[in-house]
Image (spheres, rainbow, N blue to C red):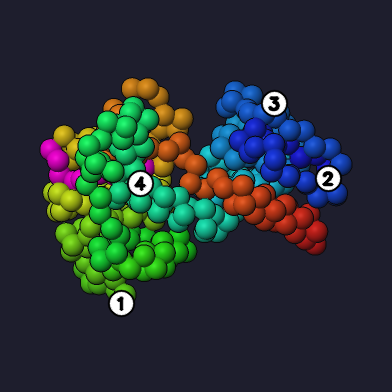
Amino acid sequence: MKAVFLDRGSFPEQINIQLPTQIQDVVEYENSSLEQVAERIKDASIVLTNKSIVDADAIKGAANLKLIQVMATGMNNVDLDACKEKNITVQNVADYSTISVPEHTFAMLLALRRNLSSYLDAVKTGRWASSEYFCFLDYPIKDLAGSTMAIIGGGTLGKRVAAIALAFGMKVVFADRKGSESTRAGYIDFEEALKIADVISINCPLTPETKDLISDAEFALMKPSCLLLNISRGGIVDEHALLRAFENNTIAGAAFDVSTQEPMPLDHPLQRLAKEPNFLLTPHIAWASDEAMQTLVDMAMEKITSFIDKPE
């Protein structure tokens, strides 16, 4: 049995990846372009991929392929229809970052709410040394306690974010689905949630229904003091509308860990915002604490073992 890992380099070296002993032949590649995949998996029984694309042509040419183990939650990099046609199992890993992502969410939120980036930069340029007083208060500082967080997405991550928000003394509301005719128990109307929120946290997946979920009309509903957090998926927020919201001072700030293009090219709309002190941008790392990555890998190895041991 041969296993091929198409993009082992997407995990740091300190993350231990030990495939099941039933696999006699393991080939690991640092990364694999779309053009390289077909050749690399043509005689593999098991393929592991984080973000390398496994398209229909590669799948059709892999005569021995039985399992594709996606080393992530999202499976949009694998042609699922082609796998179904050839009776190839596709597995992902979910709920491995239920600590890492919410912690990153609040790291970003606290940095925005307390203007940490501006103060850190000011100290580095000597502003404190020239201050007339023991401190300087050039940038406004706000507490989280007493403010309202609206969470879009009531799954595992949304609930974990809510728990941390409550611990900070925030009021939490869950926004119902956009355009819903009735409001579910435990939720409030989508537009109402946007209107009352001091902080909006997006914790839902990207689907056809959530693409451009937040655009010009939604920004117009928000308080000018509102902060928007997207630590979920690029495309849920219309990035050009976000630019316009900043230009028009429609919102006070935002923090993103994702974008519609990853890696992000230099001419991407969010690159322009990244120079603003009230916009924080990290390179899709919210999931990637050492603990979360090792949990992901361990869960994936258990799934592969279960697949191999499953009676035919």
Question: Which three-letter amino acid code belongs to the residue tagged 3?
Answer: Glu
User: Which numbered disc flags the more N-terminal residue, 1 or 2?
Assistant: 2
Q: Report the disc number at residue 111.
A: 4
| Residue 74 coordinates in the image, percent (x, y) | 51, 48
Question: Which three-letter amino acid code belongs to the residue tagged 2?
Answer: Ile
Residue at image coords 66%, 50% = 294
Say if the magenta span includes residue 253. yes
Question: Which three-letter amino acid code belongs to the residue tagged 1?
Answer: Ala
Q: Which residue is mark 3?
A: 39
Q: CA distance from mark 1 to mark 4?
A: 33 Å
| Residue 125 coordinates in the image, percent (x, y) | 34, 27
Q: Report the disc number at residue 23.
A: 2
Q: CA distance from mark 3 to mark 4?
A: 46 Å
User: Which numbered disc flags the more N-terminal residue, 3 or 1?
Assistant: 3
| Residue 285 coordinates in the image, percent (x, y) | 50, 42
Callout 1 environment at 10 Å: few (<14), some (14 to 19), or many (20+)?
few
User: Which numbered disc flags the more N-terminal residue, 3 or 4?
Assistant: 3
Q: Which residue is mark 1?
A: 185
Q: Is residue 186 visible?
A: yes
